[in-house]
Image (tube, rainbow, N blue to C red):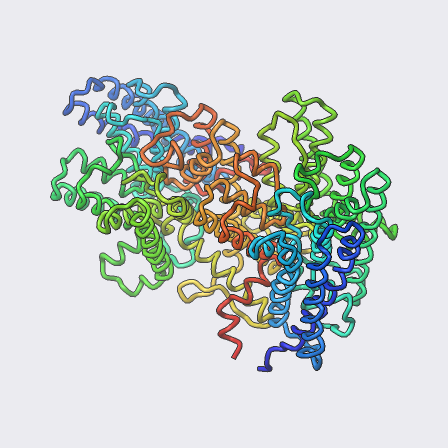
Amino acid sequence: MRRFNYRLLARLTGILLLVMAAAMLAPLAASLYYADGALWPLLLAAATLATIGLLLRNGIGRKATYELHERESFWVTSLVWIAVPLGGALPYLLSGTASFTNAAFESFSGFTTTGSSIIPDPSAIPQSILLWRAITQWIGGLGLILFVVAILKRLNRGALRLYSAEFSGTQQRKLHPHISTSVSRMWQIYTLLTIVLTVLLILAGNGVLDSVCLALSTVSTGGFMTTPLGMSGYSHLTLALLTLFMFLSGINLALLYNLFTFKWRQLKASQEFWVYAAVFLLAAGSSAAAFGVMGNGWPRSIGYSLFHIASTISTCGFYTTPPPAWPFWVSVATFLLILSGAMAGSTGGGIKLRRLMTLFIYLRNYLTRMLHPDVVFTVKIDRKVVPGEYVNKIFGFVFLYICFIIGGAFLLTLCGSGIAEAFCLAAANISNLGPSPLINSLGASLDYALMPTAAKWVLIALMLAGRLEIFALLAIVSPSYWRLRR
Amino acid sequence: MRNPTEWKALLRFLGIILTAEGALMALCLLPAIHFSDGTLWRIAASSAATLATGCGLWHTFRRHTRINDRRMSYLLVTLLWLTLTLFATLPFLATATTPSFTAAWFEAMSGVTSCGATVFSDVGGLPASVLFWRSMTQWFGGFGVVLLVLALTPRLGINKYSLYTAEASGADNTGKTTVRTTVTVRRTLAVYLSLTVIFIILLMLSGMHLWDAVNLTFTNISSGGFSPYSDSIASLTHTQQYLLAAQMLLSGVNFTLLFLLCTFRWRQVRHKVDQVGFYLATCLIASAFVVLSVHSHTGCGWSDALRLGTVQTLSALSTTGSVIDDYTQWWTPATFLLLMLSICGGMAGSTSGGLKAMRVLILMRNARSILRSRLHPNAVDPVRLNGRPVSGHIINNVMVIFIVFGATLMLGTMALMLGGVNATEAIGASAGCLTGYGPGLGASGGFGSYAHFSAPALWVCSLLMLLGRLECMTVIILFLPRFWRR
């Protein structure tokens, strides 16, 4: 077999590091404007990343051939997802905001759009660093590989492999026969959403930097917040806007593109969208009723429920002060939504509704077959048959997902967590949700900064596994990968 | 479904079972007489009531012997357990040992499903006849009354195979050693009876009184876990504890396999070699971890750690639920591991509960196979068990059971929390009841009991036990509207 195409890996990583160095220009500008004292650390970080990036891109990766085999695509995806967040940790490290583990945690949490933070008081750190935090989420939101795929039109078939390594499992309908075209369309809609939200937030009376940070966190379903109290200091209008955009971010980007190009029929025909909307309304409605019945006042109950459920189902992870009486039903709904997540092909995490729909239909068929053993059933979504092997893959994915939650929870108990707390932490981080009032309601602390170092690395691994939908990460540690490489 | 003769046959069947139960209940008169605990007439009345109902039904519908409708056999299995439980409450109610019907129902269900969760915080204060009845319910429940009846009345006319699979885990029909269910049942029964006798003798040889030997063997060979003592098996001698551990180990092994081994039919063993290997390997690895953690965290010597660790690990893996030490006070990861082991469970075709080794094995191999197929998309790599490829149909069915099991566990936890149980304890109780392990975490774990649970929580637990014993699907299908449609 041909040797591993490490030159291409170097080139892709190099390009991404250069992109990050370029992205650091924004915090640099912010730092100059606000004079927050983070100028030199940021400059140093940008310079380091640019140097390494250039070395990788034009040194090792100069003669890269654009050929990529299936197995290499897993390597490339996983390694890029490890290297780039490590590079993105530099600003935190150099500005003295965090120690190495904490910086890595914050950076991985950003790029995987989890939103778990080790910074107890975000308002106390330089504003430029806050901006950088938000930018990492935005870059990670759509996927690092998707970033490269959009830039490198020469990747062709390799691009498709990378695309499926990062977005595994579900059958995706591409927007355009050309993968790079459909990816750049996704980027367009993603950018458009971000800009619209930023403008709306500024119009709603928020500070410019704050609006930008919040918009970047919302559209990417990241969930880093800029105040220690979460979102409780913001106006109702702001919260309403965020709710709407969190809901939108849970929608498949390809569908959103259709929505913005007025192809309503596509949206109407998507069963998953209707399930998503129904689940959202049902969860929010029942939560609002639960809050209201407990005497929290109806306007507040409804408002809070909409915000909280949108934040949970899109795995964004924003939180605000809950009404005083916390109904148990909300905890249940929250936990279920953490696992389910939003639509496949959105920026959110979790198992994804499309997979759950497939499982549900299969389960229904199974029960019917117990009664009528000779009837042949198929699983259909959007009037299309889902082939048996896809169903099997989805089952496999869900199994591994649960295994990762259990395994992660076990490792967390090794680091000293209680059992219930460990489960919630593992689930919230593998689903890239991050902070949730659910963990608070268990009496556990949300303060990731106080966790032991080992626990932080476990959570980092979980975030990464969740973001890469497990297979890409697992593929490179699979023995069969190495055995058959000869 | 609408055919009255089928219903009559069903009632006849219930009559047979109830007669058997009444006869076994009559055996409880022996300890009542021997210890003269003053419950003689009450037990006699319960037994008479059960016998009368049973014989009445049997005699009335003696001419209706055939059940041909598949749906009726699903209904029969569930009704069977409910009826058994209902009449098993009689001794508790008649002697007024339980505070309420709910508690009696819980205790009876825990016995009949050989779960081992108890509502009695002080078992030592119970009359001997009631103690014996608890052991007795586990002994006949653990083995599965359905198998018992099938063995005793081979010419029953019921669709035996469908009943057998409904009862004892449908996954285990890939490598059946014999085609005829009756033969399997007879072999299983032979093994079960001889193991019971052998272990009673062995325990008596080790210096135990006949009374304790019978009670403990009845509850441990059936992977039940009730004990006539409040401290379960903690105050026995070390030899006796190891003997009970051997019972637990064997109660998790497929009984047909034991039969083949005892009759030196080595060649047929290969059909189950993978499951045995997996079961034993899990025993070894998990024991090693638990022993190490007991040694390092509770500060007892190596020999004590070895005893406590292995016995409790075997108790968890075979879902017996005998307690040798308060494991809730052990190092959290060890407790967590015990919980996971009980979910994994022993081999299919044994008395243990949980998911069963074969299913876990298929799940793991399928995940590996999916991973491989992503790395090598063109390779043909079926999941193999015991050297034979497993069909995709069976894999997906195993997946369905896994997911339903997981969902039931999760919903059970939530229902218990809604019933006022705290999070950790709810996880423990839900797993304990669903898998048939019995004791959970927190106050209901270790030497504790379920006495402090509210009535709704006890009902949830009873339901979980039933679901766990009948492997969820048989019960769930009754809630399908299609089931009741003509």
Q: Is any part of residue A345 visible from this angle?
A: no
Q: How many marks?
A: 0
Q: Nearer the viewer, residue B206 or B421?
A: B421
Q: Measuring 24% from the left and 26% from the top, which residue is drawn there?
A: B124
Q: Nearer the viewer, residue B277 or A296?
A: A296
The quadrant in which residue A229 appears is: top right
Q: Position of residue B461 (x, y in %)?
A: 44, 32
Residue extending furthest right?
A262
Q: Is A351 on the left or on the right of B433, as rendered?
A: right
A446 lies above or below A170: above
**For this view, does B355 lie left or right of residue A36?**
left
Q: Quadrant of the C terminus of chain B?
A: top right
Q: Answer with left or right where residue A463 lies relative to residue A253.
A: left
Q: Position of residue B37 (x, y in %)?
A: 19, 20
Quadrant of the rendered image containing residue A103: bottom right
Q: Nearer the viewer, residue A401 or A270?
A: A401
Q: Would residue A374 be visible to someone looking at this image?
A: yes
Q: Is residue B481 left or right of residue A242?
A: left
Q: Does residue A230 lie above or below A396 as drawn?
A: above
Q: Position of residue A143 (x, y in %)?
A: 70, 59
- Residue A80: x %, y % from top left: 64, 66
In this rendering, is residue B125 above or below A37?
Answer: above
Which residue is painted at 58% across and 53% down in the image? Answer: A102
Residue that appears at 74% across and 65% down: A19
Residue at x-position 47% and y-position 31%: B422
